[in-house]
Amino acid sequence: MFSFIWSLIVGGVLGAIAGAILGRDVPGGVIGNIIVGFIGSWVGTMLLGNFGPIIGGFPIISALIGAVICIAIYSFIAKRMA
């Protein structure tokens, strides 16, 4: 149970850091940050593999790069639809 909570915390922090790097707010607040952290971890791991230290089940560097990519793609699509 604690590992699941730890994963949520790490995912949320990764999403928040990625949003700060790009200067964009993730829609959905904390839940949005957690979702972007999880999806970004998956994308980053698929592109880069397990790169960097693993905390809470997330390879930090790969997950952060993946989260930045996810937010950039979302921002591009949202800008086009508006």
Image (cartoon, rainbow, N blue to C red):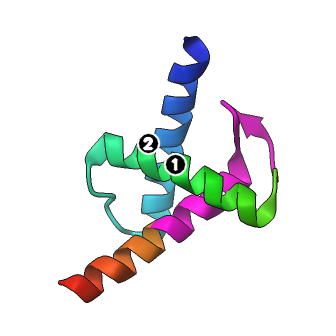
**Rendered image: mark on residue 37:** 1
Is 11 contained in the magenta span? no
Query: Separation of disc 2 and disc 1 at Cα?
Result: 5 Å
Callout 2 amino acid? Ile
Depicted 4 relative to depicted 17: above or below? above
Q: What residue sits 54% from the left and 59% below the top?
A: 67
Q: Which mark is residue 16?
A: none
Q: Amino acid at mark 1?
A: Gly
How far from the left and from the top, in percent, is residue 45? 73, 55
Magenta residues?
A: 51-70
**Mark 1 Cα within 10 Å, few/some/many (few <14, many 20+)?**
many
Secondary structure of the residue carrying numbered label 2 = helix
Using residue 5 as the reference point, say whether residue 28 is left or right of it: left
Q: Is residue 71 left or right of residue 59?
A: left
Q: Quadrant of the N terminus?
A: top right
Q: Residue furthest top?
A: 1
* Residue at mark 2: 34
Q: Quarter of the image containing the C terminus? A: bottom left
